């Protein structure tokens, strides 16, 4: 392997080893043994810090030259290691007449051996001796390591004889991989050359197939650990899918099989073409730049590109805002395009490798035996769809769509060389192909496939055929959304949503989505749903409301795809209102009949309602793991069923009074009380309570009230599996500020309120129901947790605990959300409900936010009737149904402005302390 210094300019500006060696010799010659080591260490620390500073200065001048920065860093460490070796062997443990065993070769292994390092990468070193280690070699190795450790370097080290090195490499894949990239740094070169010869002759030998197989397994397992997608919004630059480790794996495989000395040699041995190597090097250079910037910013070995780092790296790499897209979103789109390139090059490399190994009868990839009859000129190559000749697509560009339709229809994989040809020839898709009726029919067949559209659409996207055929989709390829809610890029999110739609239709997700599964069998406009799912986020990043702009895209695109005017209108409507159902379910009071009427008025037809429900479900679920839960399922189901009844009958089947009477009758049967006693209980609870609460909660509340009818305070906490949450009921004497005290106590106990209903009985007692989850969206279900919740609330309401002091004292954890800036906003509506003023607060989510907002409502002298809490990553959307103290809507403009100002102040965390003092 070439020296790491070969292509480095002005090496002495990084480190002047000759001058530094003379300084160390002078220090050693003074014979001040007590201070000598400290002075040597100080010189080395200064040199290391200066060298890193110079490398970072160069990187900031040329922020995209990552490969150069990585090789400069390896060069710097080389010089430090050489200086330490010479100092130790000459001055600390000199040996005038060394025996044959008193020889050491210092080898760089792993990434350091490849000559590429980020500023805080591990320094992987192998000390190799000809025979068993002597006392001198042990002393030297120990002294070298202690100096490296004292420099703050994280050292991965091994010390073995030649025989031990060979034996360990034969037994351990990790050691074998590290030695594969070994490079001589300093010491006895003859030992290094012996080690190298024995490694290739005795270890590599005839184990190429096994090495390739194990490396592929290792890669797949690593991908699973990292999320198994190259489009996660906080990717790992080193180990994630599409990261540097994937490129290194190609080099390891190529070197193991062909003994190449550099990645460029992969071209000469036929594992990459010149163009593929150019793309390999371009992606590697960019990823190294990102990784080096991350290490420089954090001053540590940080390989996960977190939200806070994304902004800083984007600025260091000179990305800028553009209309509709921020600096960080443009940077991350470019990152994902490079990660996609890594995936493309990997696929092509494996195809070349497969062909080479197949000729020797050692094919390591699986084969397929299915033989479809009609392939329209395409061929099968050992079970994979392949081209008969290289210009097959050029003869008829519609075949670029047909190959994917055939792959889906027959359940075939596409040969990687055919994928390479598709990617190369995707430029042939012009307006004529886009308008071709057969091409559009083929695309629609894939999109609406009852088999596995997600996989085939992802292949189509990776080949760039998807974006060429649907130019609007090309605009969102690799486009991230800079927030904590969306886990994937826009294109990946949309393709995952299509896959979920197919799984729901097939019944695979019936346990999670029973209502959607049943509805899919009732839907008349099946292909409308698939097209709308594809297009629902198509206009993100254009600088306007993506729902409105997306509807315009749908109106233009659907006729081209072959949809009739009625289908086009429905797709456009679904795209325009794809957020309506979730916004209504999660941010409005579904017990308020006007909520249902307004939603039904917007939807207008049962078919649209069915389509919108399923689209909403797959949209939420495709956001990322953990976003969907049973609470959201229940809210959407409740909204669907109530709206379906209105649309089917034109009104609620049973009026308000009938519904109250039915719930009372049901409760009476459950409680089995004497008529007079039940009538007394029922009369205590207002009509709004009977409308708002579901029957199971009413029954539990009633038993709680009866058991504590003489108490001033009683708290009931239980796991509520139907809602995926914990139900907490507080029965207490009603008084101003009760809600915000309860909210503060729940926060102190580690809970998040996701829904709250506030009721006051006719005798002045509050009956407040809260649904609570932990910060990870899970219910409290252990009895110890439930007891702690109850005890904390009780202490807060009986003044046994100084609530505000405890809230202020609670540690403020470092949160990912701190990377975002969200200006708080308040929207107040008096038309959304017939009885209440509806207040919606949007703000950066943070601990105790709800408590602060509740305190602001208390200070504004309003009565809270229900609260509905929704979070979208770092953004919290809290909705409150309130009245004035006399039970009427808040109409006064001055009061509304005062309420808005107080809530904005609370949302921003600038809440006045006078409320705390009053509490």
Image (cartoon, rainbow, N blue to C red):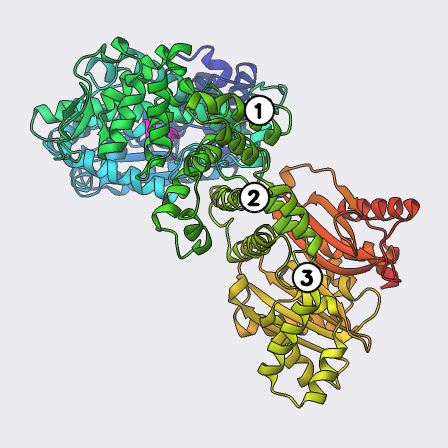
Q: CA distance from mark 2 to mark 1?
A: 22 Å
CA separation in Å, label 3 and label 1: 39 Å
Q: Position of residue 301 (x, y in %)?
A: 48, 36
Residue 650 is a magenta residue: no
Mark 2 near mark 3, Cβ–Cβ under 8 Å? no
* Front-most of residues 450 and 256: 450
Residue matched to label 3: 756
x then y, percent, for residue 558: 47, 25
Q: What residue lies at 59% left-to-right and 50% top-to-bottom?
A: 647
> Mark 1 or mark 2, which is nearer the start of the sequence?
1
Left or right: residue 384 versus residue 642 is left
Tell me how many marks there are: 3
Residue matched to label 2: 605
* Mark 2: few/some/many CA within 10 Å (<14, 14-19, 20+): some
Magenta segment:
241-247
Q: Is residue 125 visible?
A: yes
Q: Depth-wise, is mark 3 or mark 1 nearer the camera?
A: 1
Please state if 33 lies on the left or on the right of 839 as rendered: left
Secondary element under disc 2, as helix, strand or loop, is loop
List the residue tagged with mark 1: 552
């Amino acid at each position: 392997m070439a020296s790491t210094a070969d292509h480095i300019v002005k090496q002495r500006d990084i480190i002047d080893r000759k001058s530094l060696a003379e300084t160390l010799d002078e220090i050693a010659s003074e014979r001040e043994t007590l201070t000598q080591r400290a002075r040597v260490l100080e010189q080395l620390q200064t040199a290391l810090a200066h060298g890193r500073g110079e490398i970072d200065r160069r990187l900031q001048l040329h922020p995209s030259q990552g490969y150069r920065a990585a090789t400069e860093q390896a060069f710097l460490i080389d010089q430090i290691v050489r200086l330490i070796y010479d100092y130790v062997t000459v001055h600390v443990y000199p040996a005038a007449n060394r025996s044959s065993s008193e020889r050491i070769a210092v080898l760089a292994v792993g990434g350091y051996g490849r000559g590429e390092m980020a500023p805080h990468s591990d320094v992987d070193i192998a000390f190799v001796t000809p025979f068993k280690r002597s006392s001198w070699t042990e002393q030297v190795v120990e002294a070298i390591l202690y100096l490296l450790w004292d420099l703050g370097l994280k050292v991965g080290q091994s010390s073995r004889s030649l025989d031990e090195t060979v034996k360990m490499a034969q037994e351990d894949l990790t050691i074998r991989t590290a030695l594969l990239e070994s490079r001589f740094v300093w010491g006895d070169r003859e030992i290094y050359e012996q080690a190298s010869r024995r490694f290739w002759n005795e270890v590599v030998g005839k184990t190429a197939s096994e090495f390739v197989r194990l490396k592929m397994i290792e890669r797949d397992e690593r991908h699973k650990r990292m999320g198994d997608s190259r489009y996660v919004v906080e990717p790992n630059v080193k180990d994630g899918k599409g990261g540097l480790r994937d490129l290194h794996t190609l080099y390891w495989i190529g070197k193991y099989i062909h003994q190449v000395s550099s990645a460029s040699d992969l071209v000469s041995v036929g594992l990459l073409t010149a163009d593929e190597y150019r793309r390999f090097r371009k992606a590697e250079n960019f990823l190294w730049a990102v990784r080096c910037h991350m290490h420089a910013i954090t001053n540590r070995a940080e390989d996960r590109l977190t939200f806070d780092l994304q902004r800083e790296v984007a600025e260091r790499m000179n990305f800028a805002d553009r209309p509709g897209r921020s600096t960080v979103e443009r940077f991350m789109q470019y990152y994902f395009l490079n990660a996609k390139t890594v995936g493309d090059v990997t696929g092509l490399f494996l195809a070349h490798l497969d062909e080479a190994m197949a000729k020797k009868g050692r094919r390591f990839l699986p084969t397929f035996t299915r033989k479809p009859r009609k392939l329209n000129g395409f061929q099968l190559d050992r079970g994979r769809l392949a081209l008969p000749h290289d210009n097959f697509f050029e003869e008829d560009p519609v075949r670029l769509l047909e190959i994917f339709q055939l792959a889906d229809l027959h359940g075939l994989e596409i040969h990687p060389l055919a994928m390479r040809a598709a990617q190369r020839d995707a430029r042939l898709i012009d307006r004529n192909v886009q308008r071709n009726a057969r091409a559009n029919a083929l695309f629609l067949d894939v999109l609406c496939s009852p088999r596995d559209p997600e996989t085939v659409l992802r292949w189509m996207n990776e080949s760039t055929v998807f974006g060429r055929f649907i130019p609007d989709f090309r605009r969102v390829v690799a486009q991230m959304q800079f927030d904590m809610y969306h886990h994937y890029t826009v294109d990946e999110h949309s393709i995952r949503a299509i896959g979920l739609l197919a799984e729901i239709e097939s019944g695979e997700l019936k346990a999670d989505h029973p209502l959607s599964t049943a509805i899919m069998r009732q839907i008349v406009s099946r292909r409308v749903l698939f097209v709308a799912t594809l297009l629902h986020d198509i206009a993100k990043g254009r600088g306007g409301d993506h729902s409105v702009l997306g509807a315009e895209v749908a109106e233009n695109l659907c006729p081209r795809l072959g949809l009739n005017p009625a289908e086009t209108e429905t797709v456009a409507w679904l795209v325009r209102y794809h957020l309506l159902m979730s916004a209504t379910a999660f941010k409005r009071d579904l017990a308020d009949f006007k909520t249902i009427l307004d939603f039904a008025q917007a939807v207008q037809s049962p078919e649209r309602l069915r389509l919108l429900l399923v689209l909403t479900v797959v949209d939420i679920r495709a956001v990322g793991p953990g976003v969907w839960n049973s609470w959201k399922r229940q809210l959407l189901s409740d909204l669907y069923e109530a709206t379906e009844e209105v649309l089917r009958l034109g009104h609620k089947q049973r009026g308000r009074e009938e519904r109250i009477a039915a719930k009372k009758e049901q409760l009476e049967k459950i409680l089995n009380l004497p008529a007079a006693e039940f009538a007394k209980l029922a009369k205590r609870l207002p009509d709004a309570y009977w409308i708002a609460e579901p029957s199971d909660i009413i029954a539990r509340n009633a038993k709680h009230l009866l058991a504590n009818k003489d108490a001033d305070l009683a708290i009931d906490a239980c796991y509520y599996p139907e809602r995926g949450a914990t139900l907490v009921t507080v029965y207490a004497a009603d008084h101003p500020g009760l809600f915000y005290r309860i909210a503060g106590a729940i926060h102190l106990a580690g809970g998040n309120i996701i829904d709250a209903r506030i009721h006051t009985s006719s005798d002045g007692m509050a009956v407040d129901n809260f649904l609570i989850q932990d910060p990870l969206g899970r219910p409290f279900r252990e009895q110890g947790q439930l007891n702690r919740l109850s005890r904390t609330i009780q202490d807060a309401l009986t003044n046994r605990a100084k609530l505000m002091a405890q809230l202020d004292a609670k540690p403020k954890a470092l949160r990912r959300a701190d990377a975002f800036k969200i200006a708080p906003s308040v929207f107040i509506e008096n038309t959304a409900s017939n009885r209440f003023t509806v207040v919606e607060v949007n703000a950066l989510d943070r601990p105790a936010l709800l408590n602060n907002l509740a305190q602001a409502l208390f200070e504004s002298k309003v009565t809270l009737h229900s609260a509905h809490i929704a979070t979208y990553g770092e953004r919290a959307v809290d909705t409150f149904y309130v009245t004035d103290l006399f039970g009427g809507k808040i109409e006064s403009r001055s009061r509304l402005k005062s309420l808005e100002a107080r809530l904005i102040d609370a949302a921003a965390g600038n809440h006045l302390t006078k409320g705390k003092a009053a509490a």
